[in-house]
Image (cartoon, rainbow, N blue to C red):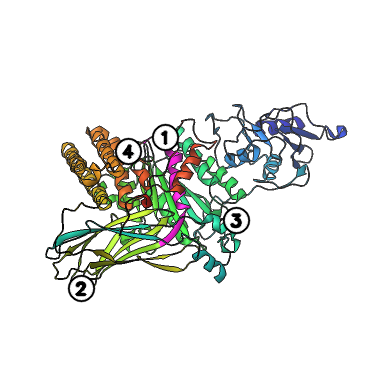
Amino acid sequence: MMGSKWRKVKMALGLHVPGGTQHDKSELSSESSVNVGGGSILTNLSTGSSQYNMSTTPSKNSPESSKMICAICLNVLTPGSGHAIFTAECSHSFHFQCVISNVKHGNQICPICRAKWKEIPFPSSSDTSIGRVISNIASRPQYDSSTINVRMMTYPTAEPATFNDDEVVNLQPITEESISRHNSHPGRAIEIKAYPEIPAVAKASSHCNFTILIHVKAPKDDGNCRMQQPGLALASESSRTPVDLVTVLDVSGSMAGTKLALLKQAMGFVIQNLGPSDRLSVIAFSSVARRLFPLRRMTEIGKQEALQAVNSLTSNGGTNIAEGLRKGAKVMAERKCKNPVNSIILLSDGQDTYTVGNPGTNRRTANLSVLPTSLNRSSGSDFLVPVHTFGFGIDHDALTMHSISENSGGTFSFIESESVIQDAFAQCIGGILSVVVQDLRVGVECIHPSLMLSSIKAGSYRTSLTYYARVGFVEIGDIYAEEERDFLVTLDIPTTESSVDMSLLKIKCIYKDPISKELVTKDHSSDVKIQRPEMIGPQVTSVEVDRQINRIQAAEAMAEARDAADRGNLSTAVSILEMCRRRLEQTVSAQAGDRLCVALDAELKEMEARMANLRIYETTGRAYVLSGLSSHSLQRATARGDSLCGASLGCGYQTSGMIDMVNRSQTSSFSGPIPRPSLKQADSFDARTQPM
């Protein structure tokens, strides 16, 4: 009987018994030991009671290298540090509690070599004595002696009806004194600049569709300042605005193998770079969707448990994007506490087989049915949480993923190369973690009584004209640190009898500071004016205005070409892109060697190549074009093709926060072996032509 129980211990733990550790030779017949790296599991075979002994002295069988990494929690395997080490039959080693968590989530496959384990440390329900051994192992034990009895923290398998079980946020009260220090910090205010297309119009002449470039730039993240002023921080552990992040991950059958392994690695990077005041929840979906854990703070314990949950994922089933998003929206909508910044990240590698993939469904009109009403800006909902979508591989539903991001205010990235997934996530969270302006609204007002606004071109940002078209607004929302936004305002310039400079516009920005919670109003330093002399000589169009006109025209050409290609008219689509390139070559900014124009030309060429035939367009061309349109319409960096910047245009939208995070990803010890050059930030707007 005793031998039978002991064999069960060996089989359940998947371990080999060394000579044994004799705590008391007289009790050898009733107590035995199984060595697990630097620890051992002690089982009293006569009583069934168990202990987990965490020896602080490494055994001879422990790994000798202190630099070995546990592929589940991504922490260092250090023998004798109080963490038992489990070596599987495939010879790969992990923290014992990490393996236990993985197995409890149903994963019996090695995260490194994908070998299926036959001997795993998880007992059947009948092995009650061994079950008590496992239940006494903590996910993150704290101990005062070499022998402890602790429990493992787990989440219930059945989800609650209401997702109001989020962990309480850790916000400190902000005093009036700290707010004053925060608002007086240099560089806290948003920058506003204006560029008329030409400096003067003769007073006896009129000018239709006169264009003015409005440029706004978010301030730098003053995290260092807040770290020096603890009373100003929202959370004592964090030096920036805390974030609520929900990741919705495709774990359908097509994600098996390398894709799922790289997704886990990318999620590991995200988790490790969240702060203790940030909260994360993970939704995994295939044929159905399930919440792995509620919104919880990414403290050290929170990170470890999140990593274990993510690394326990297995792939199977179909692709139900709608159900995954519905559950992600539910997490955001029903939380009892809220951090200032909110975002959802959605990744999928396949077609939605439950909504837009039904027979007889028109995918071009039905793809919005995937997006919950609460996340759709067009529904008028005040619940504005951007969904940043990532189409992974050549089989994903680019139309659906782009529609989801576009209608929720997020970005769409096309990850063609598997090796780019972690960098793409890094770029995205590098922005999300640096929000310094919220609910930004830019207003323009005509000054001269005879002026009226003709249009405001702002990409996908919502615009409106009021008061007989004399006042206009652009609704921008959240802005990352150092992000820039450019809008073109057109109006008709009438004749005048006066030679005095004509005042055209007043510009004002209204936004919320996420730190002080105060509403901030920022006016342009002076009115936008033009000269009205008797006579004028030849004038050159402002390079700044010209380059933004080129950007908007290129985006319009991309959208037109995409529509033609979707109708099967690839030759027409290529002609549209080619004509746009020829127009760009003749512009002032292109002839001046402007970097944006060079990048636009290269991007248009790349799109032409991806429309060479229907097969290429269906597999990569459509996704490449849509990710470009997403980037230009929001003026925000996306991943495109096999790089983050596509034809290097996206780098023009990258911020220092994004670049720093990507460089951190590329130098991370958990990144892939593929060498990638470090990114450098594009020239800032300050280095360009001096505005009016």
Position of residue 215 relative to residue 66, above or below, is below
Which mark is in front, 3 or 4? 4
Q: Residue at x 76, y 35 (%)?
A: 57
- In terms of secondary structure, where does tag 3 sit? loop
Q: Which picture quadrant has residue 424?
A: top left
Given contact means CB atoms under 8 Å apart, are the residues at marks 4 and 1 in contact? no
Q: Residue at x 52, y 62 (%)?
A: 337
Bounds of the magenta segment: 416-438
**How far across and how far down the image is residue 123, in percent?**
64, 38
Q: Which residue is mark 2?
A: 449
Say above or below: 22 vs 651.
above
Question: Given the image, on which type of amino acid does mark 1 rest?
Answer: Glu
For the residues carrying marks 4 and 1, which lies nearer the camera in this image?
4
Q: CA distance from mark 1 to mark 2?
A: 58 Å
Query: Does the residue at mark 2 contact the one at mark 3 (Cβ under 8 Å)?
Result: no
- The answer to which image quadrant residue 600 occupies is top left
Which residue carries the number 4 mark? 647
Where does label 1 land, which residue? 418
Q: Which residue is mark 3?
A: 237
Q: Amino acid at mark 2?
A: Pro
Q: Which quadrant of the rendered structure holds the C terminus?
A: bottom left
Q: CA distance from mark 2 to mark 4?
A: 45 Å
**Label 1–label 2 contact, CB within 8 A:** no
Cα–Cα gap, marks 3 and 4:
39 Å
- The alpha-carbon separation of the residues under discs 3 and 1 comes to 34 Å
